[in-house]
Image: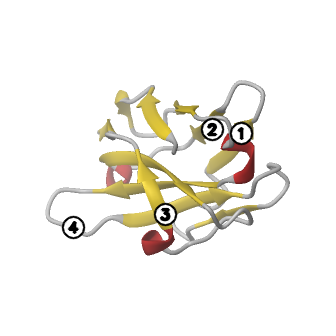
Amino acid sequence: QVSLVESGGGMVQAGGSLKLSCAASGRTFSSYGMGWFRQAPGKEREFVAAVNWSGISTYYAASVKGRFTISRDNVKKTVYLQMDSLKLEDTAVYYCAATRSSGGTYYLNEYMYWGQGTQVTVSS
């Protein structure tokens, strides 16, 4: 069992940066692949980034590659999403999720634990 709590969301101007954090509880955090997803109003939840159990392998959606960086600290049981060069279209609720696929995955349905989400709003 893993519980996830996101933080770090807020409002930022286009071109700015935010860093999201996701704190996990549970003894086996380091065995889980971790991901970030987002959901904008009226749209389906979509994949943003994922990281494998060790933090060595990362994956990104094409829309954020080169602007966002996912990382994890297994000692602190925390996963991060550094978001730079933010665009208006990055506005969404961002969710942290955990999967037993330790290598990480793009597929939403393979994540069984989810946080409550944190709002990110990018303004012009």
Q: Quadrant of residue 78?
A: top right
Circle nearer the N terminus (3, 1): 1
**What's the residue type where badge 2 is placed?**
Val
Quarter of the image with the C terminus in it? top left
Label 4 residue SS: loop
Q: Quadrant of residue 35?
A: bottom right
Circle nearer the N terminus (2, 3): 2
Q: Which mark is residue 113?
A: none
The correct choice, above or below, for 63 with respect to 96 in the image is: below
Q: Which mark is residue 79?
A: 2
**Could you tell me how many numbered marks the image carries?**
4
Label 1 residue SS: strand
Check if mark 2's residue and mark 1's residue have beta carbons within 8 Å: yes
Q: How many residues crowd around disc 2 within 10 Å: few (fewer than 14), some, or many (20 or more)?
A: many
- Disc 3 from disc 4: Cα separation: 19 Å
Residue 102 locus on image (x, y percent):
72, 62
Q: Which one is in front, 55 or 41?
A: 55
**What's the residue type where badge 4 is placed?**
Lys
Look at mark 1 in the image and give the residue it sits on: 72
Circle nearer the N terminus (4, 2): 4
Q: Which one is in front, 53 or 8?
A: 53
Between label 2 and label 3, give the one nearer the viewer. Answer: 3
**Which residue is found at the position 79% from the left and 49% from the top?**
55
Q: Which mark is residue 43?
A: 4
Residue 19 lies left or right of residue 6; in this view the side is right
Look at mark 3 in the image and give the residue it sits on: 111
